Amino acid sequence: MPIHSAQLPSSIVNVAVAVIHYQEQYLLGFRNTAQHQGNRYEFVGGKIDPDEAAIDALIREVGEEIGINISNNVAVKLGRLHHDYGDKQVCLQVYKVALTGLQFEQHGHRQYGLEGQALSWVSKSQLLAGDYPLPAANQTILAWLQLPEQLIITYPLAHFIENPNASEAWLTYHQQHLPQGAWVYVRTKANAIKAISQQLEVQLAKQLMDFRPDIDCVLPNNIGQTLIASKQDKHLSCYQANQQLKACHLTHTELMDWFTGATNGLECSQKNPECLSADQPLLISCHDADSIHAANQLAAARLQQQQPPVIGIFLSPVLATQTHPNDVPLGWDKWSSLAQIADMPVIALGGLSPMMVQQATQYGATSIAGIRQFMQS
Ligand SMILES: Nc1nc2c([nH]c(=O)n2[C@H]2C[C@H](O)[C@@H](COP(=O)(O)OP(=O)(O)OP(=O)(O)O)O2)c(=O)[nH]1
């Protein structure tokens, strides 16, 4: 069972884990029977020596185990997680490493690693489908890997307010302009328009999911919870509720309310965990170090309670945006140093275009997101 960082005993084993891939093929080793968590597949990795940086351990372990020098590859931190196996407690520091074509050509055919362990290249879909049994702690890593490289956020309803029927215009626009198969954070911000009820927000999300069964959705926490509760609703099949809804979203304010709420008597607080979806993974918006620490705490609490994990945070704004002209952008350097303290994948947001995905990766982003520049013309 995963444990909270405050309760970590000193005997915890720190492990650097490399999720090595070439395009959609992922490398797995096989742990032999004698090893802890033996007879299971694993990502390449091993113990971090005392006083060794996690990234140095990663490079060393990959070199020792499979003979690939990744010191010039970009290693994007996916996250950090604690897990108690009962007989051993581990803290996994997980990085995603994309091999170059040349590296894959040189090493991709090898069936055994330098320590005699069997190696397999498996497709991402097989890996995520659970076709290869991994240690229990790796379930969270698989959930992190579900996040796509790009996410798209819907325009708020207010964007269509000049229109005689704003909700219809919102729906028609997104029906036509969301890219095929996209992960979409469906955000209407309807509560900003007083006359519009939460019921309409739920209705719009349902209708969009109905019209576009190809898209995967992230819904605001309250909307997602309402939808799950109304799974029997004839307007939304169980299939859609289960398959299309990938995560519930918490705003920065909701996160901080949850974090500080216990002292302020708020309904959604750490003392009232039911206020957050216990059925769905979470995606959280953060803008600063305090909120990232709160997100880390929430992620640890959910692991401890064996609830679906926090699969990522949106960290914004990277650059100036048209939609939030008064917000001071973080800039890439500040953004990057904040991203390092997150215990989960970090999605770059704010003033970005899909062309900037490689640049974002260099600064530590696992994914990028946006509105206008991510829509299809
Ligand atoms: N390498 C690796 N270890 C993992 C993964 N998931 C997971 O829970 N672990 C755990 C299993 C082990 O307890 C620990 C890895 O340490 P290790 O690979 O150095 O362990 P080991 O048993 O081979 O080490 P040793 O004591 O024989 O030196 O982390 C994973 O995906 N890759």
Image: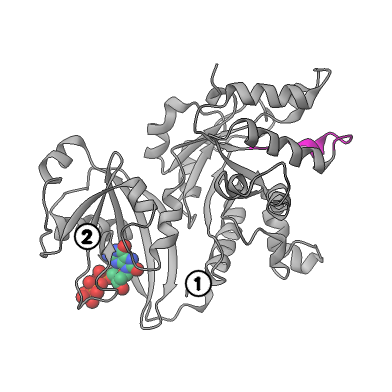
Q: Quadrant of the C terminus?
A: top right
The reply to whether the residue tagged 2 has its Cβ within 8 angstroms of ligand 1 is yes
Q: Where is residue 157 drawn, in percent x and y? A: 75, 29
Q: Where is residue 368 drawn, in percent x and y? A: 48, 36
- The answer to the question of whether label 1 and label 2 lie on touching residues, with beta carbons closer than 8 A, is no
User: Does 195 lie within the magenta span?
Assistant: yes
The residue most toward the right is 195
The quarter of the displayed image where residue 194 is located: top right
SS state under label 2: strand
Boundaries of the magenta span: 186-196
- The residue shown at (80%, 38%) is 200
Q: Where is residue 163 drawn, in percent x and y? A: 80, 17
Name the amino acid, label 1. Answer: Ser
Q: Where is residue 202 drawn, in percent x and y? A: 75, 42
Residue 188 located left or right of residue 146: right
Residue 11 vertical position relative to residue 362 in the rendered view, above or below: below
The residue indicated by pointer 1 is 5
The residue indicated by pointer 2 is 29
Going from N to C along the chain, the mark reached first, 1 or 2, is 1
Name the amino acid, label 2. Answer: Gly
Residue 321 located left or right of residue 191: left
The residue most toward the bottom is 87
Q: Nearer the viewer, residue 109 or 243?
A: 243
Q: Is residue 362 visible?
A: yes
